[in-house]
Image (cartoon, rainbow, N blue to C red):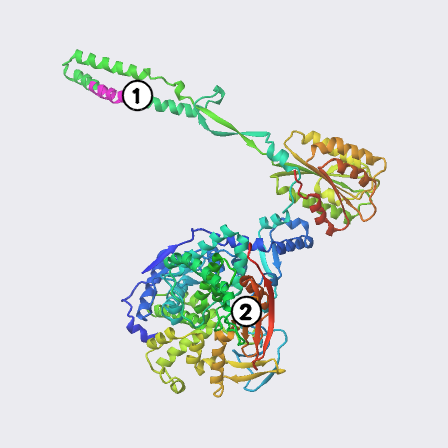
Amino acid sequence: MVRIIDRRFDSKNKSAVNRQRFMRRFKQQIRKAVSGAIQGRSIRDLDNGEEVSIPARDLAEPSLHHGRGGVWEQIFPGNDQFSSGDRINRPLGGGGDGSGKGKASNEGEHEDDFVFQLSREEFLELFFEDLELPRLIRTQLAKVTDYKTQRAGFKSDGVPANINIIRSMRGALGRRLALGSPYAARIRQLQEALDDALARQEADEDSDEDTLRALREELAALRAKVERIPFIDSFDLRYNNRIKVPRPTTQAVMFCVMDVSGSMDEERKSIGKRFFMLLYLFLTRTYEHIEVVFIRHHTVAKEVDEDEFFHSRESGGTVVSSALVMMRDIVRERYANGQWNIYGAQASDGDNWDNDSPVCGRLLANEILPWCQYFAYVEITAGEPQNLWREYARLGAEHDNFAMQRIESPADIYPVFRELFKKTIA
Amino acid sequence: MTTMTSRAKAPARKPPLPSGSEWTAEAIERYNAEIARVAAAYRLDLYPVQIEIITAEQMMDAYASVGMPVNYHHWSFGKHFLSTEKGYKRGQMGLAYEIVINSNPCIAYLMEENTLTMQGLVIAHAAYGHNSFFKGNYLFRTWTNADAIIDYLVFARNYISECEQRHGEEEVELLLDSCHALMNLGVDRYKRPPKLSLAKEKLRQQEREEYLQGQVNDLWRTLPAHDTRSGPREAPRFPPEPEENLLYFIEKNAPLLEPWQREVVRIVRKIAQYFFPQRQTQVMNEGWATFWHYTLLNHLYDEGLLADSFMLEFLQSHTNVVYQPPYNSRWFNGINPYALGFAMWQDIRRMCEHPDDEDRRWFPEIAGSDWLDTFDFAMRNFKDESFIAQYLSPKVMRDFRMFAVLDDDRQDKLEVSAIHDDSGFRRVREILSDQYNLGAREPNVQAWNVDLRGDRSLTLRHQPHRRRPLGGSTDEVMRHLARLWGFTVRLESVDEDGNIELKHEIRAERRRNGN
């Protein structure tokens, strides 16, 4: 009469389709909530999922039901003070004993936000939606230059250096056993007969030399046959097999170049930092392995670690080209073997020593941009564009892998970021 | 439990049922066997039981698609899934994870994460309590067809996904949105529905499409001919009698719907109809199932089959379920149907077995009768509204300390109109019964007239119940209605004095492509 069925291993995620449809339908609201969340919290925990809340009325399912008003007479439990005919003041704003708003109107009353959890993937998907890594396709997908070799079992021909001794000897042993086995039984038999005959000869002197000789001869002939089975045959040899598999270039290096001269105060640096963080996160979506090189500069450039990059402060003038020279040298030295996607991001307040700006322009145009997937420059300033901006503006027109934007306050970061990495149609 | 032990004699000294919190398939089987034995002794009439063990995630899936094992796809189910998931992760939903499907065989879901005690409780509650209610109660017997529902849902899902492929997901989604908005007015409240059957549905569906389309076209095509008949007297209304089932009205009469759209409207209507009895028997049904899990498990305990640890855990869950917070508690959220139902069924049994003078006065025909017969009769022939009107005793009203509050928006104060005293019992019972009257709970809106000769506009009439207005989303519902109807729709309200007032009007003139 009863059937017990274990369904636990049946198809899961039956609601996945419904969930997707929900996400698709409320994409606008979800996207809005996501960008709100980004503005609200530190860029550093961007890599988590996000609790998204959508105004409940946006996704209410309408129905015909009673609203407030008219006459309601309802039963409540737990009378502790009332008797018939008592008159009570209307409770304000839905306390315990709501009056007119019974079950019938509960749909309309709930104006709380609908809150749900986006997974990290969903969150980032939305965050990076319609952004695309610029010029990504070229080196990463179309041109697979790198191979790695990996072991793939054994094969029966190859170069002597690749002979696998254990496999080969094991095969030889097996072959010897197999070929020798028809003779082995006969040898054992003959040996027993011979031993027997010898024993009898010793006991009663009744020797039959002919039988003994016949046995010995046959035994010798068989042993010789077994001996003739080769110890190892070319047929036994096994070679390690190695094959080449293409390895897509999934590594990138990101250069963070920042001006730390006296004019860059903490706030500007923090804006710069957020921009770099965002870029880093963005790259982690596309590349498995990312190296980050921090170069800071005032009049001279220095490669530093992350902590020093953001926290120590220098003073004095500014020579931007020093940092670019250093970047160029590092690229040549470490990342020029064609396996790296190179990204550059430069943050500055735009101040530069006048004669240096044209040098920067030339350095970028001739020695850095040709190597780079993308180079972004953000100028963190509220004031007029400085000379560096004007110099770079010329570059922007000539190179499509160069972009520049201005940021005035933290709230600008995200829009500017999106602007910089707007989908480029390749 | 003493009276029953003689009737359902336990075979001499059985080994006790397994205890502890880990469950195994064998343990579930043994529990089920024992519960089935006792249930039979109490003369519960059941569909065959099918117990399915599922994971929490699958349970949430089932929850999201209104408890059905198969359903068509729609974003609103995704929304329900997300909020259920959130509730589950925060541990807010406790015992609520029990789903039983009114089908033959009766499918009860057990969640993997439950302890053995909870599995036993859910088996007794769902697979025996609800099961017997589904099989016996007149509403379920007339309105739902347990043999066919799963097949019908499979048909519905396949049909709708076929429509999605043919006409695009978005198109279907918009249509479903509109149907869902009218879902609670898509049921026949009084008319008895025909039985569902998969084979017939499939066979007739094609036929029906063509036939319906033909009929609708006919309605409009013959329009000019009417001119000869039209005289000075008032034109006859269409429909001649107001139609309460709006989805039915749309399916049969909306002029511009494609055949597949009519079929989708029909599917939503059929499913709404299927859930209609559940909405009308909450107190009875939940109370009944709670009463039986309590009675069956106590019976097993009296036979010495259940460990004390089992009983403690079970009673803890049970008391949580039947707790009724008072009106001024922050947990108060209306009357708990489990609590009220359980109290009423317990009380009926008490009146049968140990009646006092008050019971004899109030319920002469129940007091002292055979409780199993009385139960069977009550379970089969009532719904919440009539069940309360018939069986709510002064004792239960006293125990709940019920009082009635009258809220008239023309008075500046609320009035306590009756309390749990001799003069108030009947009034309280009447009000509570009315509270469960679906006619009072949901607005009375009916299709009133279609302007056949003019702009084909559809007029609905709302008869307010005790001057209650319609809620805030009415305008949106009317937009959905207009989308389905294809022409202007209006909503009129008739007040106490018979004055008619136009409340909503959505002007729409949609032409079919190519016309």
Under circle 2, the secondary element is loop
- Mark 1 closeness class: few <14, some 14–19, many ≥20 residues within 10 Å: some
Q: Position of residue B342 (x, y in %)?
A: 43, 73
The residue type indicated by label 1 comes to Gly
Magenta segment main secondary structure: helix
- Mark 2 closeness class: few <14, some 14–19, many ≥20 residues within 10 Å: some
State the extent of the magenta-drawn residues as a range: A180-193
Under circle 1, the secondary element is helix
Is B495 contained in the magenta span? Answer: no
Does residue A303 appear to the left or right of B495 in the view shown? right
Asked whether the residues under marks 1 and 2 belong to the same chain, the reply is no
Rounded to the nearest angstrom, the CA distance separating label 1 from label 2 is 104 Å
The residue type indicated by label 2 comes to Asp
- The numbered disc on residue B451 is 2
Q: Position of residue A108 (x, y in %)?
A: 58, 68
Answer with the quarter of the image where residue B189 lies: bottom left
Q: Residue at x 63, y 47 (%)?
A: A129
- The numbered disc on residue A236 is none
Q: Nearer the viewer, mark 1 or mark 2?
A: 2
Image quadrant occupied by the N terminus of chain B: bottom left
Q: Residue at x 30, y 21 (%)?
A: A180
Image quadrant occupied by the C terminus of chain B: bottom right
Which of the two residues, B375 or A419, is positioned nearer the viewer here?
Answer: A419
- For the question of whether residue B69 can be seen, the reply is no
Give the residue number, with chain letter if any, for mark 1: A180
Q: Residue at x 53, y 56 (%)?
A: B173
Q: Position of residue B411 (x, y in %)?
A: 61, 83
